[in-house]
Image (tube, rainbow, N blue to C red):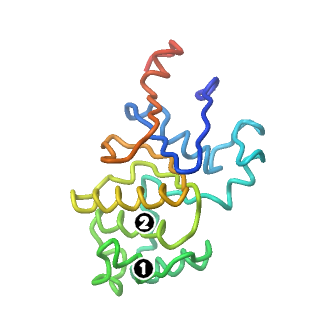
Amino acid sequence: MVFDGLDFDLASGGLLLLRGANGSGKSSLIRQLAGFVPANPDAITWRGEGQLGLADNLAYIGHQPAVKPYLTVRENLALMGTVFGSGGETDDALNYWALDGLRDVPARFLSEGQKRRLALARLLLIDRQLWLLDEPNTGLDSVNLERLNTALGAHLGRGGMVVMASHVPVDGLAATILDFGALVSHTGDGA
């Protein structure tokens, strides 16, 4: 019911930016697209197929960085490459996110920003066309926000697609904005 009447298409190279207050449904939509929350069978399609075809084509980064605390930084990335099939080099992903000096440090010792960068490093390691990102810029300083924008731009430039919830602007990237505040006001459901 939350998304009744919501309809959008995302083309190759497209960025859909989800905006709205906390609790307005941004994370729920991303989780539904990822397949974590059930949707009506025909509600989500991928290239004319049902949602099942989407599963092998997406990468999801949620609120929690989902790192294994007792594995090192490098082991965390290697695990993701093994589970999801590596499309890139672990060292390249570590270098890009300035984690190369921490490669042998157990993830439990990382700061929140470092854990976030480790989670985002997965995007460079696994080859997926659709990135579903739930506030990926949380905990990032200005240097790493720029790295994120650069990674997003490169992905979109290769024909990738991104659905991203964010309260922070994405500088220099063309985006379609889906304003959840306007959706709630439009439906008359209140906050």
* Residue at horizontal 43 percent and vertical 61 percent from the top: 154
Q: Residue 8's image quarter?
A: top right
Label 1 Cα crowd, 10 Å radius (few <14 / some 14-19 / many 20+): few
In the rendered view, does 150 fall on the left or right side of 88? left
Residue ID for mark 1: 70
Q: Which mark is residue 88?
A: none
Q: Residue 94 placed where, x, y %? A: 37, 78
* Residue at horizontal 47 percent and vertical 70 percent from the top: 124
Give me the C-alpha separation between circle 2 and circle 1: 15 Å
Placement of 30 over or under 156, stated as above or below: above
Q: Amino acid at mark 1?
A: Tyr
Residue ID for mark 2: 119
Q: Secondary structure at mark 2?
A: helix
Q: Residue 4 placed where, x, y %? A: 64, 25
Q: Residue 38's image quarter?
A: top right
Q: Quadrant of the N terminus?
A: top right
Q: Nearer the viewer, mark 2 or mark 1?
A: 2
Q: Residue 125 placed where, x, y %? A: 50, 73
Placement of 66 over or under 188, stated as above or below: below
Q: Residue 103 placed where, x, y %? A: 35, 84
Q: Amino acid at mark 2?
A: Ala
Q: Secondary structure at mark 1?
A: loop
